[in-house]
Amino acid sequence: MSDRSDPIPPSAFWESPDPDAPSGVHRKGPTLQTAREVAHDVNNLIYVAYANLDLLGELSLASKAEDLITEAKDSVMRASELLRQLVATPVEDPEPIIPLDELIRDLSPVLKSLLPSEVSVVLDLSSAAIVRATRSAIERIIVNLVVNARDAMPSGGRLTIATRERRAISGLQVELLICDSGSGMVQAVLDRAFDPDFSTKVDHSGSGLGLHIVRSLAEQLGGSIHVESIAGQGTEVGVRLPVYARERRTG
């Protein structure tokens, strides 16, 4: 059984397109680009499933094993749903709405299973915002950003997931912040952060699609994304989405 702090990298499950291959091989228009993005997300979900199943060999308590199996099954089912989206005929969603902070709390066990034990997770959720989006769209945004943060902290660190509301010219927005204490990026790398064919991972452990996917999803939801990074100190990624409504809170 592999050590929990050193999980098998995602490249063991799915090989990224060869960046040195001829352009016609790995980039042939929107259809292949969509397939790459979905495969990237499926890879993240399968990694969650594997990490949980790998832990089963280290546990002796049936109750803990049952919880991990449940999380693994949920992750695999989400992967199956993403694959169905790839081949299905698009249909209009009935304008789903999602309480953002509630979704993050529900997703936090899955997010923690993505991370080695050397990475501590802090939730700083202060928003009552409800956004107009599918659950899967918000989950894809969060999982991609958490995976990027994990990869920037190979020796451990601190990951903060925060929400806050802000006023913009267009109206009230909610900002989802993913902050890591990792390696950060120099300006030349930051300038290419959203390039789908650019990756800093020389070992091919990732495809470089994470931020590109997040920006595409944010823009589809009427929002935007910004990245701030300091080499050697860490990175902050903020996704700003329009607030559809606000939760009523008591107490």
Image (cartoon, grey):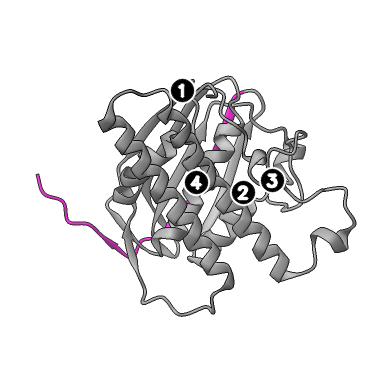
Residue drawn at 54 percent across, 61 percent down: 217
Q: Quadrant of residue 163?
A: top left
Instruction: Give whichever of discs 1 and 3 has the lower sequence position.
Output: 1
Q: Is residue 248 magenta?
A: yes
Residue 51 pos. (x, y %): 49, 35
Tell whether 117 sits left or right of 100: right
How far across and down, in percent of the image, does residue 137 sit?
46, 60
Residue where numbered disc 4 is placed: 143
First in sequence: mark 2 or mark 4?
Answer: 4
Q: Nearer the viewer, mark 4 or mark 3?
A: 4
> Which residue lies under the disc numbered 2?
210
Estimate the spatial distance between the alpha carbons at disc 2 and disc 4, rounded to whole Å: 9 Å
Whichever of labels 2 and 3 marks the residue nearer the N terminus, that label is 3
Amino acid type assigned to the residue bearing label 2 in the image = Gly
Which residue bears the numbered disc 3?
193
- What kind of element bears circle 3? loop
Q: Which residue is mark 1?
A: 117
Q: Residues within 10 Å of mark 3 (few under 14, many from 20)?
A: many
User: What is the distance, in whole Å, between disc 4 and disc 3 at their CAs?
Assistant: 17 Å
Q: Nearer the viewer, mark 4 or mark 1?
A: 1
Amino acid type, callout 1: Ser
Q: Amino acid at mark 4?
A: Val
| Foreground pick, 214 / 38 | 38
Contact (Cβ within 8 Å) of mark 2 with mark 3: no
Front position in the image: 4 or 222 = 4
Labelled pair 1, 3 in contact (Cβ < 8 Å): no
- Give the magenta part as a residue range: 233-251
**Which quadrant: the C terminus?**
top left
